[in-house]
Image (spheres, grey):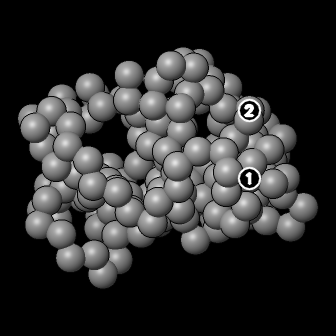
Amino acid sequence: MIYFIGDLHLDHTNIISYCNRPFTAIEEMNEVLVQRWNDTVKDTDTVYYLGDISHGKGARLNNWWWKQLNGNKVLIRGNHDRDVSGIFPVYHSLIKTFNGTEFMMIHSPSGVEWQGWIIHGHAHNNDPELHPLINKDTKAINVSVEMLDYYPLSLDKLINILV
């Protein structure tokens, strides 16, 4: 299976209020996000991660968090991703074809000139009219965790939504 997700922001206390996440504390958020990922993703699955694994004062290193999460991960570097070398492939952007459709994956969709579908994070749930899960007008797919009920989105489900 192939999955997409971005913007977990593990250990980031302020993200709870900033994005109105349904958690009362950072420990609860971290536990739920890791559990939902690992309940969904198997070790043989591939996850395209659209940036920003952890953030904030006192946050554990990104590489520590990656070891907690199942699957073969491909990172599209986010603006808060610092220590991500040496574990798995890391890209600024990546173009892949799935089910005959070409997709560009990039953390932030701002200023991107691409005629096809864009899979991105970065927008969270801050402007759901401009950055909903699927924006057919701009051909953009926002896989920030808040848009996915905090679960990775499978390629099969994504293709079914687009059809």
Choose top left, top right, bottom left or bottom right for residue 78: bottom right
Choose top left, top right, bottom left or bottom right for residue 37: top right
- The percent coordinates of residue 18 (x first, y second) are 64, 65
Relative horizontal placement of residue 157, taking residue 163 as reference (left or right)? right
Q: Which residue is mark 1?
A: 62
Q: Which residue is mark 2?
A: 68
What residue do we see at 17% from left, 65% from top? 138
Quadrant in which the N terminus appears? top left
Could you say whether the residue bearing mark 1 is in a helix, strand or loop?
Answer: helix
The extreme front residue here reads: 86
**In this view, 58 is above or below 150:** below
Could you say whether the residue bearing mark 2 is in a helix, strand or loop?
Answer: loop
Evaluate whether residue 20 shows in this view: no
What residue do we see at 53% from left, 62% from top? 77
**In this view, 95 is above or below 25:** below
Relative horizontal placement of residue 144, taking residue 140 as reference (left or right)? right
Q: Label 2 amino acid?
A: Gln
- The percent coordinates of residue 160 (x first, y second) are 18, 29
Q: Label 1 amino acid?
A: Asn
Which of the two residues, 114 or 88, is positioned nearer the viewer here? 88
Evaluate whether residue 116 shows in this view: yes
